[in-house]
Amino acid sequence: MPIGNNSQAADRRDSDSSLGSAIWEGLDGWIFGTRLMRFVSDFGSPQGEVAGDFGTRDTALRTLTRLGAPVPPGFAISNVACRLFVQTGDLPEGAWDEIEAAVTRLDEAAGLIDPDRPVLLSVRSSAPVDMPALMDAALHIGTTAESTRTFADWADEHAAMRARVRFLETYARVIRGVPARRIGAISGAISPTSTTTQLATASAALEALIIEETQRPVPANRLSQVREGIEAVFASWNARPATAYRRVNGIPDETGTGAVVHLMVFGNLDEHSGVGVGFSRNPTTGAPSPAGRYRNEADHPTTAYEYQGLDALAVADTETHQTLETALASYERERLDMVRLDYVREKGRLWILEGRVAERTPEAAAKVAVDLVAEGVLSREAALARLDPQHLGTMMHARLAPGDLPKPIAAGSGSSPGAATGIVVLDSPTAMAAAAAGQSVILVKRETTPEDLEAIRRVAGVLTSHGGRASHAALVARGMGTPAVTGSFDMLIDVDTNQVRWGDTVIRAGDTISIDGTGGLVYAGELSLIKGAQTEEFSTILSWADEARRLEVWANADTPADAAAARAAGAEGIGLARTEYMFSGDRLEVVQRILLTSDPRERADALEQLERLQVGDFERLLDVMDGQPVVVRLLDPPLHEFLPDRLDVEHELAEARALGEPTTELESLEATLDKFEESNPMLGLRGVRLAVVIPAVYKVQVLAALEAVRRRLDAGGDPRLELMIPLVGTVEELHLIRDMIEEEVHNAGRLLEVTVGTMIELPRAALVAGEIARESDFFSFGTNDLTQTTMGLSRDDAEEAFIAQYLRRGLFRRNPFETIDPAGVGRLIKVAIEEGRAANPELIVGVCGEHGADPESIDFFHNAGVDYVSCSPPRLPIARLAAAQAALRNGGS
Amino acid sequence: MPIGNNSQAADRRDSDSSLGSAIWEGLDGWIFGTRLMRFVSDFGSPQGEVAGDFGTRDTALRTLTRLGAPVPPGFAISNVACRLFVQTGDLPEGAWDEIEAAVTRLDEAAGLIDPDRPVLLSVRSSAPVDMPALMDAALHIGTTAESTRTFADWADEHAAMRARVRFLETYARVIRGVPARRIGAISGAISPTSTTTQLATASAALEALIIEETQRPVPANRLSQVREGIEAVFASWNARPATAYRRVNGIPDETGTGAVVHLMVFGNLDEHSGVGVGFSRNPTTGAPSPAGRYRNEADHPTTAYEYQGLDALAVADTETHQTLETALASYERERLDMVRLDYVREKGRLWILEGRVAERTPEAAAKVAVDLVAEGVLSREAALARLDPQHLGTMMHARLAPGDLPKPIAAGSGSSPGAATGIVVLDSPTAMAAAAAGQSVILVKRETTPEDLEAIRRVAGVLTSHGGRASHAALVARGMGTPAVTGSFDMLIDVDTNQVRWGDTVIRAGDTISIDGTGGLVYAGELSLIKGAQTEEFSTILSWADEARRLEVWANADTPADAAAARAAGAEGIGLARTEYMFSGDRLEVVQRILLTSDPRERADALEQLERLQVGDFERLLDVMDGQPVVVRLLDPPLHEFLPDRLDVEHELAEARALGEPTTELESLEATLDKFEESNPMLGLRGVRLAVVIPAVYKVQVLAALEAVRRRLDAGGDPRLELMIPLVGTVEELHLIRDMIEEEVHNAGRLLEVTVGTMIELPRAALVAGEIARESDFFSFGTNDLTQTTMGLSRDDAEEAFIAQYLRRGLFRRNPFETIDPAGVGRLIKVAIEEGRAANPELIVGVCGEHGADPESIDFFHNAGVDYVSCSPPRLPIARLAAAQAALRNGGS
């Protein structure tokens, strides 16, 4: 309806801002108009009928309580209370009564533990989906003059005052919104060595600050503090960090968060106190014995410590250590996975404050999964289902060794995973020479072009200032397994002075830097790396995955070496061999001759030379992949990609003119570039259109491919050539090329069989897939290009210009160049498969875009009925595992 | 299935090339396995049960015969005979027997006319759809030694030998395929003044040539010649010119052509012989009296002659003249339209050889239609249905005066209809100055940019070397009604020497040229023009059209002047006001300040200035369109369109460096251009994406639009503002802008109502139209961009690079930037309308792309349920008429 502030529009607005019935919308099933169910439940009691959900923090503490682990007494408040609070500004009717009663029960339980202790409370969020540290927590709630005296009696004055100051800091910031700058001005003056008097001064100053800033003192009433704390936690659900996180992660806004309130325990009281983390297994190696760390309060200032077993705790306190190990074991059995418990030792007594499934290295993840299956705890299927393919995939790549990393000097897109360290080189020829001389090189450029292909293969890493995860540099590096950071936008490359600058940071060519292509970070100097390798357990998991999956997993590979690597990594075919990559390096000169000469004889010579070269290319590829399908894509990119850069030529021309040198040749080159120049090359003369306008190149490629098949047959091989036509938009285009191929097959004069298919990478191709399928043996979805055209997004431009911003603001849920857009691009894929198969039941359907190794996309492809995904060789393990998960999740294995 | 020459593939091929059952496929209903029906029918007998169709030439001659007009005796052969001939290489069983019998009947009829005359035959194609002059004809068939003697006795030796030579020329070329070069070597030596002996020599030489080239003499048997003639005509159905024409015009290949065989008559025998054309009305003016021309054989050599009544014939022969006028009148009554008859006067006797509906000027077309309705011959609906909107539309534009035109010096795309003549100017500032001084100017550029907007409005015509019918120059010129020829690709502009060159042709700035923007031609010098104007009859037709149509017709207009013109031309609203056109001229400086300054205060100033300017723009537009909707599109183009050209800046920089001048400012500009540079700007940072990244510009536009609405309300007006968001791909984007507008409407603090809608110009937008419609008051299909993305075609590049070739080769049936592609783009439109309306039944649906004035596209839009089309003001009559035809054709008026 039109936007207006008159008539109905205004009415609608009024009713929105009053407490109308809308508030109750969406709560059906919990509330039914009047409140039938409870909002609050103690950890130790059965959850019962609850309005809504208590969240993950509650679930862990409730479970641990049930298992007999030492959890402080406490209770949880449901997310429905949060939701109503956010909508109305008030806790719902009855909720506060329940909370008051629960606090009373908590007090009683605390009295049973130790009647002399101060009963301070912590209030934390407990959301239905874990949102780490993004919402506010209110701690030391219940700090009053009286509680501070009790604390001093129970521990000592200093500890009591420390707790009081911490309470005031948190209270001022979280509950009253006092600017952090003003709080810091006071609390910055105190330290662990401050005296009790200094702490008392700070405490008084904070109380005064709160009054000055908010015109209200800290309530002396403990229950008022509890109420304020709960409301502050609920309000933080809709504050900036949490909403941004939810947008990016696709978590719905409307659920709201639960909250957990429990007795505070203190790990900083005496030499019998401390804090630590326990793991049910080793989170670095996956070894099946408990690990963790413990820091005794007596040991501060803090020392760095590794996960190395729980020896420190065992030494300090055998009993506590035993209690923790028992809790870890029983909680692991409950979660059927390696778990982590955060604990406090208070005056020699263990308290567990948090439990969750443990984060781990990829090696540990694989080992834990395989061990849990071996121990009979998990089925193979369950083990496969819970692994994160992307995470496990990083095992294949070198990583920065853990430990204290220096501050990065720059950031960009993590565009090809793995870490690398090497000397900075600013151009490809120098980079190749240095690499050939045995140096580890980081190639640093504005962006890369096909001329940089060989260099990207040989260097240790790539760093560019332009282009995102779908840029040329990113795609090529990912395909070759070379770590890359792209789009480090504030990086300025000064080729004249051989320097790279980020603001004041200057790196000279020849200096050593390190890059983390997984996280997208750049570091000065050499950092130590952990080499990537596939562990035995990971191989075991992949073999289970292969049994479980329905989708075949093929690889994109352009060279015999890549193909061999792919085959070794489990590829069942080559889904995309890009012939343009065969035009790079020395070949570029041949291709340029074809395009630039006006002499038909020279062009014919060059074409023949190209044909000879390509025969060898195809023959070696078919040899490596003997008995498996090899999909060769005929030339795709716009021709100007094979020509010199326009700006370079203009510069040379200007220079030549200024120096009075001859310019005829450069002018003729300029005219040719002018002819090939396109405003939007992505939508221009490329793919099958080249074959319509300049038929010779495709013909040469087809002849070369057929000759390669013949040679392989002569050698007794089993070549399975499939020719793929790119950028088809009409069945007439496909028909034209198919006819040409058919003619050449018959001219070949002996028994040859060639499968011919098309890429589906234009929306129109998907929309007329029924027609196209009748002329096509297979479809291969080029999901990169299909995403570009369906969404009108240039992958070369959009990532740096706005996709990051779109993701941050929730305008995109996922980067569509990483995860298939189901409603748009995905819908076209489904239509094309359905109508293509209806027209041609024999149609084979594959995906050869970048999405072929993205787990969420693979799930989509599995359900859409795709036959195979094809991805770059280093990503094959990810695809194999994700394909298995898709089959397990959706059936159809 | 895979292409292969082994196993099944080879089998299939064998069976294709032998005479299998496939030949009979598609003939069901005519033949039923054995031949039940006839292939041949005389003009004078009832057609009866026939296998297939005799074609349009037969229909005309058969009808004229029935009406008693003097048609030579003859017969027709059905297209099924052609089809079977093409498939098998033989005439079908029985057909030849029928033909032989028909020739015998023809001989008898000829004998009744004049027993002494030679009976030569003409064999011509008669296709189901008219394919003018694209197939072969075999004339003077039956020329033998005997027939030549008979001819000489009946007429004279010279006439007999002329006929013999003509027969041999045609026979050699059409039936025997002798190269035209060799025939020309002989027939080039003879002329109308050649003696009989010279003719006899040529005749003998041609007979010898036929033997030399084909090893067979001309058959002496007359029936053999008839058979060869019929087979040659049938074979030409599948020859190059006819197949190409069919592809381009979407005529099916499989129908085949019929053929017509009749007695040849001769207009070149004596002073009582001649040839001519008659029209039932004046084809130039439409005046309701017969017109035509006649050339007496005695008058050759040929003189040029106009359609001026049939006086010459009336003077020569009252009786023949009367017979022709009677035939014209009765045939017009039969066809219910102005007709044309081609006739021969042979020895004082009239023979009619061809009849068809007459070609005419647009003025005549309108007048004939209105007169036929007034005469009660046609209903209004029938009159509307048969008019060609495109043709009538050309009446609005100046045209080259008919007569002998000089040879064009160059060709390009006819990108904006109308003709113009003026002096060549190579840049916009000079062009505007010259136009202001009263000169008629043709602006000649490589391509145009937004900086040329004002100039395009003021000059007489535009000529560019780059870009097709969808280029900037074409779109803008069409919108403003300025004639334009674009994409004259071999034109080289040398700004240094102020010259334009096409090969050897050189035109200097200041020279006068003429352009025909309808036909895409360029002429040297000043040609005389006929001014465009709407005749009274055309206005009458448009008023009928308005009653008949369901689709509303709105206009694309950016300025108050264009809007006023549109309203005067019948526009019912403004469907597209492009705000970027408000950023041109003097405003460009303000926009550049916004983009280039790093001083926030200067930017704020510039934004404020822009807002003030836009308030005035919008206010004037809403004033002109008071009471009608005005759809204002918020800024759409990529920002670099408002910045200086990159290459220019590079040149200046190189120059400054060479001269040692300061370069800081240019370098900073270069850096900004670098930042804004995009590989594929069409898919880059534009439309709503600008508003996400740089919210200030949209906000300024919204504020200006609201202020304009307020001022119009204050003035007692009825402003109907609709704000349109371009390039929306996700509902989240639309939501963001809608929220901003809603906020500004409420901040406005008084009663305002604004409709907010979105363009659907990305495939994704169409695919998620259901979601988008819930936040949208209207959809407006941007069919240009939707075509670009759906088909992956850049309109700036593709037209010159390959679309022309695609059309020639039948890979596209229509230029998709002119006529909507129904299977791809059209399918998305239908999906979007269906799902959009399901989600929001109030949704208004319009089309504002270039297709809004294309009749075939309008038919599609009518059926798809579009509410309005919006087109440039000069094309409104076309759209109004086409919309009426769509309603009449499909119902739903």
Image (tube, coloured by chain):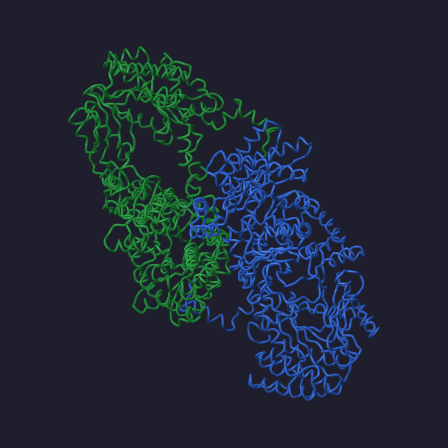
Chain colours: A green, B blue
Quick check: B282 left or right of B584?
A: right
- For the N terminus of chain B, the image quarter is bottom left
Task: Report x, y in % for residue A395.
Answer: 27, 44
Image height of A805 relative to B320, above or below: above
Where is residue B846, by image quadrant?
A: top right
Residue A51 visible in this rendered orientation of the protein: yes
Task: Report x, y in % for residue A166.
Answer: 31, 19
Query: Which of B23/A674 is in front?
Result: A674
Residue that protrudes farthest toward the front in the picture: B660
In this rendering, the count of numbered labels is 0
Quick check: B87 left or right of B390?
A: left
Task: Report x, y in % for residue A334.
Answer: 28, 31
Quick check: B446 left or right of A272?
A: right
Image height of B401 relative to A835, above or below: below
Residue A546 visible in this rendered orientation of the protein: no
Task: Report x, y in % for residue B352.
Answer: 75, 72
Query: Which of A525/A386 is in front?
Result: A525
